């Protein structure tokens, strides 16, 4: 039996997998979602969302997918690991992502580009669809794919862009974007995701417990424990989830009624010791 079943929960509350059902919509994440939705509705083209590791970019992307996939006027595509060494590999990935059928048996780079162009014009103008491409982990993109994306953003009518491109990545992507002036100038939305504050940290913990089946019985975490969690994690959602996951396991193993500050301090001390031993 899993530890969360022992605690009377139905699901794992603090998994670090990007489950949109467990997406806590902080003020930062809500603002990012609403601004992206506006850009898509206005068909402005390129939106950039940057954030440090563990700020919730991938979960945000899954939430966006959940919100848009049921809409008949939107065709939503995602690339989760944009690691491509050559222009041809990236174009081939786009062809497969867009489900474009190539007529030539051995298409050239020009054939790929022409097929993508035709697809965007057909979907956007003939079929009156909004084509959205979201690229997660975009810090892995090198200059060649970025240049191709710049070209795709050139496809437009007199009123709107035919491709709505959402790029989510870590901060190291920023100088790479800045080097391509014609791409930088096309950015319609720039948004920086920041960590949660202490109040939101508490709300995220409570939200995830409710989603996992918590029925408002005895509290699992004291207020002092939450303060220690925030102090250690600095409000990064992934770190919060990891600490809370380990804390609930301790709760079960030690047969304690509630996670207190001492439990959190003990977990942090062990984790820091483990990190030090890993450096040796």
Image (cartoon, rainbow, N blue to C red):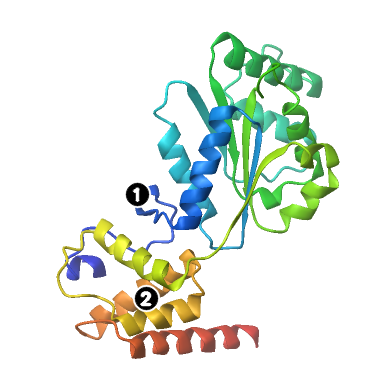
**Considering only vertical position in the picture, is 37 above or below 230?**
above
Q: Residue furthest top?
A: 126
Question: How would you rate the neighbour count of disc 2 (Cα within 10 Å): few for under 14, some for 14-19, many for 20 or more?
Answer: some
Give the residue displayed 81% in from the left and 49% down from the top.
Answer: 178
- 108 vs 226, left or right, is right
The tag on residue 21 is 1
The tag on residue 252 is none
**Considering only vertical position in the picture, is 23 above or below 189?**
below
Q: Where the C terminus falls, by quadrant?
A: bottom right
Number of the front mark, 2 or 1: 1
Residue 260 in sight from this viewpoint: yes
- 112 vs 163, left or right, is right
Question: How would you rate the neighbour count of disc 1 (Cα within 10 Å): few for under 14, some for 14-19, many for 20 or more?
Answer: few
Residue 244 picture quarter:
bottom left
Give the residue displayed 70% in from the left and 50% down from the top.
Answer: 140
- Dot 2 or dot 1, earlier in sequence: 1
Residue 223 picture quarter:
bottom left
């Amino acid at each position: 039996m899993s530890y969360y079943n022992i605690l009377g929960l139905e699901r794992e509350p603090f998994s670090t997998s990007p489950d949109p059902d467990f997406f806590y919509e902080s003020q930062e994440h809500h603002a990012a979602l609403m601004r992206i939705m506006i850009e898509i509705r206005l068909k402005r083209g390129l939106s950039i969302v940057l954030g440090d590791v563990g700020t919730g970019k991938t979960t945000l992307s899954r939430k966006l997918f959940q919100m848009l996939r049921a809409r008949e006027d939107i065709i939503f595509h995602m690339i989760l690991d944009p690691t491509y060494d050559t222009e041809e590999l990236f174009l081939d990935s786009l062809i497969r992502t867009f489900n474009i059928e190539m007529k030539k048996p051995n298409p050239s780079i020009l054939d790929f580009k022409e097929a993508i162009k035709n697809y965007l014009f057909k979907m956007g103008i003939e079929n009156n669809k909004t084509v959205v491409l979201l690229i997660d982990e975009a810090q892995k993109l090198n200059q060649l794919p970025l240049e191709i994306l710049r070209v795709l953003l050139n496809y437009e009518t007199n009123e709107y862009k035919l491709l709505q491109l959402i790029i989510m990545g870590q901060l190291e992507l920023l100088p790479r974007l800045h080097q391509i002036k014609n791409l930088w100038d096309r950015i319609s939305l720039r948004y920086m995701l920041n960590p949660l504050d202490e109040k939101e940290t508490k709300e995220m913990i409570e939200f995830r417990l409710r989603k996992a089946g918590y029925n408002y019985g005895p509290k699992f975490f004291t207020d002092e424990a939450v303060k220690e969690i925030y102090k250690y994690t600095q409000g990064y959602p992934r770190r919060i989830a990891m600490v809370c996951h380990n804390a609930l396991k301790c709760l079960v193993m030690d047969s304690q009624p509630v996670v207190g500050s001492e439990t959190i301090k003990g977990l942090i001390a062990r984790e820091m010791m483990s990190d030090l031993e890993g450096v040796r």
